[in-house]
């Protein structure tokens, strides 16, 4: 019963005149007064609407008002009660005292005292309920704050875990790539001729990301790029196709000698119409061999046919190994 809420007072007495007198004497805007003439009626009313205060006659015909207090409290909790009695029996007064009444009043009643008692108890209950309500409100707010902080902490933890996982994968990928480059460079050191160099190059890409096809080109004495070898899994493509695929790329590389990925299907206009039907789904990785600035000595043209296309990771690898490959080709000439 918080501040501003109407309090429910149940007056129980088997004397009609006294019930009406008490109802009139206690009536106010913030009190709703209900009356009952018997123990049964009082218990039924209390079950329908929990009273905030009982005003209970000790004797209700053949019933005891104390029994009513007990029954109401069993159903509705520790409802405060003012006990009224016209008896001077010490045992009856002792039994009433054990119910912890707000007040034990004898007849004839002092109405002013009764009004003050009722008002004081209602105000006390309201203050108590206000404190309980405020405490519950604070606890709910604290619980909300804790839940928010917990969710925030969980979100940060999940983000941190995701970042760490991503960082680990990145570092792991970089380490794997670095090891692959080191292994590849070791094979270049052992290479005896251009065929060994280009075979190592194609094995590197095939081992990392699946089947790959292509051609190796080196410059002749007239500085023309010519095909010196074809590669592929399970076998290389025919020479006419390889020549028609590689020829247009020479002009592109001469204009801009850098590693490049080309979607042949989207750039079909670059190629001989005779191979147009074989271009959809085909991606090309062109790897110019430039051992020193301005000196193009060869070109590796690798391509895939509808399998996993070349990616930025493949392009990054090509850029890392282009110079060692070019140096090895020059050494083995």
Image: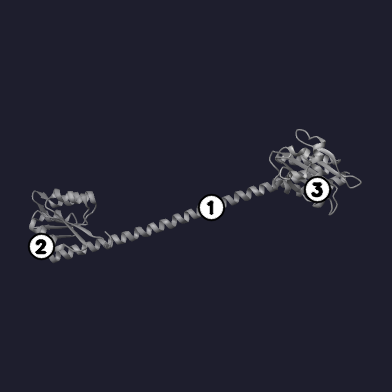
User: Which residue appears at 77% of the width and 42% of the height?
Assistant: 302
As measured in the structure, the alpha-carbon distance from the residue carrying label 3 to the one carrying label 2 is 114 Å
Please report whichever mark, 3 or 2, sits nearer to the chain's N-terminal start: 2
User: Which residue appears at 46% of the width and 56% of the height?
Assistant: 148
As measured in the structure, the alpha-carbon distance from the residue carrying label 1 to the one carrying label 2 is 70 Å
> Residue 297's spot in the image, x, y percent?
86, 48
* Circle number at residue 157: 1
> Residue 224's spot in the image, x, y percent?
88, 46
Most distant residue in the right direction: 221
Please report whichever mark, 1 or 2, sits nearer to the chain's N-terminal start: 2
As measured in the structure, the alpha-carbon distance from the residue carrying label 1 to the one carrying label 3 is 46 Å
* Circle number at residue 167: none
User: Which residue appears at 80% of the width and 38% of the height?
Assistant: 242
> Residue 94's spot in the image, x, y percent?
14, 55
Dot 1 crowding, Cα within 10 Å, few <14, some 14–19, many 20+: few
> Secondary structure beneath disc 2?
loop
C-beta proximity under 8 Å, tags 1 and 2 = no
In this rendered view, identify the residue nearer to me: 324 or 304: 304
Dot 3 crowding, Cα within 10 Å, few <14, some 14–19, many 20+: many
* Circle number at residue 109: 2
C-beta proximity under 8 Å, tags 1 and 3 = no
* Quadrant in which the N terminus appears: bottom left
Read off the residue under disc 3: 288
Can you say whether 275 is above or below 141 in the image?
above
Can the viewer see residue 87 in this picture?
no
Count of numbered labels shown in the rendering = 3
* Horizontal arrangement in the rendering, residue 209 relative to residue 225 (left or right): left
> Secondary structure beneath disc 3?
strand
Q: Quadrant of residue 229?
A: top right
* Quadrant in which the C terminus appears: top right
């Amino acid at each position: 019963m918080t501040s501003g809420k109407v309090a429910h007072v149940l007056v129980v007495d088997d004397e009609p005149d006294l019930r009406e007198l008490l109802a009139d004497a206690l009536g106010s805007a913030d009190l709703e007064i209900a009356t009952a003439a018997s123990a049964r009626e009082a218990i039924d009313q209390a079950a329908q609407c929990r009273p905030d205060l009982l005003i209970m006659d000790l004797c209700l015909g053949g019933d005891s008002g104390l029994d009513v207090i007990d029954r109401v409290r069993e159903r509705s909790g520790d409802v405060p009660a003012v006990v009224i009695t016209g008896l001077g029996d010490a045992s009856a007064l002792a039994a009433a005292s054990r119910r912890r009444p707000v007040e034990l009043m004898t007849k004839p009643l002092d109405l002013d005292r009764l009004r003050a008692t009722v008002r004081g108890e209602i105000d006390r209950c309201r203050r108590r309920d206000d404190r309980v309500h405020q405490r519950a409100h604070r606890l709910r707010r604290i619980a909300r704050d804790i839940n928010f902080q917990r969710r925030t902490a969980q979100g940060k933890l999940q983000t941190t875990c995701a970042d760490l996982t991503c960082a680990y994968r990145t570092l792991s990928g970089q380490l794997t790539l670095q090891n692959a480059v080191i292994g590849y460079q070791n094979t270049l050191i052992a290479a005896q001729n251009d065929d060994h160099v280009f075979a190592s190059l194609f094995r590197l890409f095939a081992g990392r990301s699946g089947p790959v096809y292509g051609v190796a080109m080196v410059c002749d004495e007239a500085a023309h790029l010519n095909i010196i070898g074809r590669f592929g899994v399970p076998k290389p493509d025919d020479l006419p196709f390889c020549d028609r695929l590689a020829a247009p790329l020479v002009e592109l590389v001469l204009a801009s000698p850098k590693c490049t990925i080309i979607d042949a299907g989207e750039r079909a206009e670059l190629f001989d119409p005779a191979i147009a039907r074989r271009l959809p789904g085909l991606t090309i990785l062109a790897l110019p061999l430039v051992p020193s600035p301005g000196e193009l000595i060869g070109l590796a043209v690798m391509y895939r046919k509808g399998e996993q296309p070349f990616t930025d990771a493949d392009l990054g690898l090509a850029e890392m190994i282009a110079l060692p490959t070019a140096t090895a080709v020059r050494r083995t000439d």
